Amino acid sequence: QVQLVESGGGSVQAGGSLRLSCEASGRVFTIDAMGWYRQIPGNERELVASTTRGGATTYADFVKGRFTISRDNTLNTATVYLEMNNLKPEDSAVYYCNSLSTNQFYWGQGTQVTVSS
């Protein structure tokens, strides 16, 4: 089992920045990849960025050059960050942390990001 706890959402004006954090606990040594998804009401959840145990990263086209994903590992925890710069109103969504562990996905509770124009 892996537990994910997110923090760092909030409200910001267009052009501003936010940093999301997600701390994983439990069987963190089984985590292969961690990432961030987002969901706008009425839309499907979509990948924003992900990073593998080896450090490979993937970004959605709509965040390339603006968002950066990074990861810290300790013996008992793994934390993934999403640095979001030059935010746009269309980035407003609930952001969910995700981990892939032994072929099973785990999700955080979500954190709201609101960008005003």
Image (cartoon, rainbow, N blue to C red):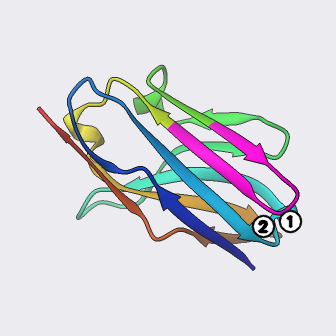
Q: Is residue 75 magenta?
A: yes
Query: Is 77 positioned to the left or the right of 88 in the image?
Result: right
Give the amino acid at mark 1. Answer: Thr
Report the span colored magenta.
70-82
Question: The residue under label 2 is which amino acid type?
Answer: Ser
Image coords of residue 39 (percent x, y): 35, 58
Using the rendered view, name the quadrant where residue 87 is placed: top left
Q: Quadrant of the C terminus?
A: top left
Q: In the picture shown, does residue 115 fall above or below 42?
A: above
Q: Position of residue 95 (x, y in %)?
A: 41, 55
Q: Secondary structure at mark 1?
A: helix
Secondary element type, mark 2 = strand
**Residue position marked by numbered label 2 in the rendering:** 101
Q: Which mark is residue 62?
A: none
Tell me residue 49's x, y (percent): 56, 41
**Furthest residue toward bottom:** 1
Against 48, is 83 above or below? above
- Left or right: 77, with 91 as reference point: right
Q: What residue is pinned by disc 1?
A: 30
State the residue lying farthest toward the top. Answer: 65
Image position, residue 11 (x, y; %)? 23, 45
Spatial CA distance of label 1 from label 2 is: 5 Å
Q: Is residue 51 left or right of residue 48?
A: right
